[in-house]
């Protein structure tokens, strides 16, 4: 078996039967990282104790302890998720030497399951971006073509899975940051419903939008991993109490009798025609599998980008106020305290972060709040109502994840607006707080294309049904890049 491209499920089976040890698995992944990470720059750091963690799990298994099915399997974490004692840079100079003092709730749960915390993944600075080029540490490259961007902001997490550095990874998705790079790199990305996964220990970007999300090779793997990290957490008041369900009960690969909606506003000009054909073919497959395909309308879609960026920048400007050179990370001392703040923030943050703090502060300021932030919040409600309305007619929605395939490194770097527009199909999902999945559905211009499935709040099971059905009929998810 090729361990680097095995699924979570396959590795779990091998570990439980004793055919493989965790140490063997981790050794293979470390080798793959060593060979390819210099070029791809998916990881910013590898856990020094990865093999020790693996040996501990192997010893516990040998001693006859009954372990979680995912015990001994490595996972990569985006570098804005805190692991006690590890560096957590959020891709920023501001936190270049910052070490986390506690574990995020998701990390506590991964540890309880016995998963191996393998490394820290590269990302756009503070998760602001769609290409991972905004990382202070340099861009992550697309393993299908290293001249192309990986997508972002969770490019490092996604490429780690696509390039066989780890079978699964966690990222964060505020406006598409897991689904969009998953689409551009040919893997599965799932953003859960807002409130399903605790954000305690995730560095805040847009607090009303952020959700820790999973990157995997298959939909089934996404379901297995999400089950480990989800659920109520007293340390994050937005989390919900979830019904107890078992994985087999959640996974039903059939769409017979389902009504799947195709939003007409999502297939308009500006979209790459080859991407469009791939997505249309995927929709056709689901029709063949027994779903009824229905055209629906999400009429406020044209306002989604403006609404999202106003809200996100406003919330980010407030969340990033804590980086003052006094309490966290980088500090540049100048004459007065005020000058120290200014110099720290001037030199510690990159251009995109500063742009967003300025715009967000403006949108929240007295005299402009009503015209910008408040207005955006009102439009957000209308966007949410579009989804509510659509879900009275259909069980799930099918859309492209990204209007194009991966673009050239540098191509949109100097043009923030072009970069923002590439998020057109993902941001509404966060505004509406609904769950969504991106899964590979073919190739355009020799690069991967993603199909997005969107469901009602807390109906991740519907995403699994549609996604698994598609993956039992097609083999796009088994294709691997050159590495
Ligand atoms: N590309 C989007 C942005 O730059 C999404 C970022 C994210 O989801 N973290 O805001």
Image (cartoon, grey):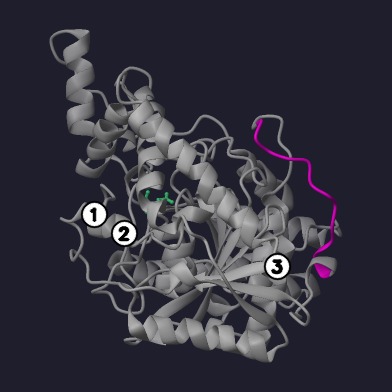
Is residue 203 at least partly visible in the picture? no
Disc 2: which residue: 421
Would you place residue 49 above or below residue 11 in this image? above
Across and down, in percent, residue 7 comes to 62, 75
- Report whether the residue tagged 3 is closer than 8 Å to ligand 1: no
State if disc 3 and disc 1 touch (CB < 8 Å).
Answer: no
Q: Nearer the viewer, mark 3 or mark 2?
A: 3
Which of 347/242 is in front?
A: 242
Which of 149/253 is in front?
A: 253
Q: Where residue 240 is drawn, which disc sits there?
A: none
Across and down, in percent, residue 115 comes to 65, 55
- Report whether the residue tagged 1 is closer than 8 Å to ligand 1: no
- Provide the residue span drawn in magenta: 237-248
* Residue that appears at 35% across and 33% down: 372
Would you place residue 300 above or below residue 210 in this image? below
* Residue that appears at 78% across and 58% down: 68
Would you place residue 431 above or below residue 199 in this image? below
State if disc 1 and disc 2 touch (CB < 8 Å).
Answer: yes
Would you place residue 164 above or below residue 117 in this image? below
- Report whether the residue tagged 2 is closer than 8 Å to ligand 1: no
Disc 3: which residue: 395
Q: Secondary structure at mark 1?
A: helix
């Amino acid at each position: 078996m090729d361990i680097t491209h095995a699924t979570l499920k396959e590795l779990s089976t091998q570990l439980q039967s004793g055919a493989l040890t965790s140490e063997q698995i981790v050794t293979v992944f470390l080798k793959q990282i060593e060979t390819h990470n210099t070029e791809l720059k998916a990881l910013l750091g590898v856990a020094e104790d990865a093999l020790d963690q693996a040996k501990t799990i192997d010893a516990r298994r040998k001693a006859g302890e009954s372990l979680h099915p995912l015990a001994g399997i490595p996972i990569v974490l985006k570098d804005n998720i805190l692991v006690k004692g590890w560096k957590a840079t959020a891709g920023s100079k501001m936190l270049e030497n910052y070490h986390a003092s506690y574990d995020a709730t998701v990390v506590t749960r991964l540890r309880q399951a016995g998963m191996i915390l393998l490394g820290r993944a590269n990302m756009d600075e503070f998760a602001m971006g769609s290409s991972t080029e905004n990382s202070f540490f340099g861009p992550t490259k697309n393993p299908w073509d290293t001249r192309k961007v990986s997508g972002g902001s969770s490019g490092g997490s996604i490429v780690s899975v696509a390039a066989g550095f780890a079978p699964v990874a966690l990222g964060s998705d505020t406006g598409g940051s897991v689904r969009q790079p998953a689409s551009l790199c040919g893997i599965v990305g799932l953003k859960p419903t807002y409130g399903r996964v605790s954000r305690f220990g995730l560095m805040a970007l847009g607090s009303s939008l952020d959700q820790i999300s999973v990157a995997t090779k298959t939909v089934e793997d996404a379901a297995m991993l999400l089950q480990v990290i989800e659920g109520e957490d007293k340390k994050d008041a937005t989390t919900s109490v979830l019904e107890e369900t078992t994985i087999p009960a959640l996974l039903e690969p059939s769409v017979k009798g389902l009504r799947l909606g195709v939003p007409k506003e999502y297939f308009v000009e500006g979209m790459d025609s080859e991407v469009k054909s791939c997505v249309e073919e995927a929709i056709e497959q689901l029709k063949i599998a027994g779903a009824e395909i229905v055209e629906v309308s999400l009429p406020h879609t044209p306002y989604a980008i403006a609404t999202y960026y106003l809200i996100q920048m406003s919330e980010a400007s407030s969340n990033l106020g804590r980086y003052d050179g006094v309490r966290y990370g980088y500090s540049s001392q100048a004459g007065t305290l005020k000058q120290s703040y200014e110099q720290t923030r001037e030199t510690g943050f990159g251009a995109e972060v500063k742009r967003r703090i300025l715009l967000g502060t403006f949108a929240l300021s007295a005299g402009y709040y009503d015209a910008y932030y408040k207005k955006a919040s009102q439009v957000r409600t209308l966007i949410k109502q579009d989804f509510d309305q659509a879900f009275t007619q259909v069980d799930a929605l099918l859309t492209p994840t990204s209007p194009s395939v991966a673009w050239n490194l540098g191509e949109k770097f100097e043009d923030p607006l072009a970069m923002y527009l590439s998020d057109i199909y993902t941001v509404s999902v966060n505004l509406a707080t609904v769950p969504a999945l991106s899964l590979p559905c073919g190739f355009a211009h020799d690069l991967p294309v993603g199909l997005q499935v969107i469901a009602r709040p807390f109906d991740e099971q519907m995403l699994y049904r549609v996604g698994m059905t598609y993956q039992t009929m097609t083999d796009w998810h088994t294709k691997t890049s050159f590495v």
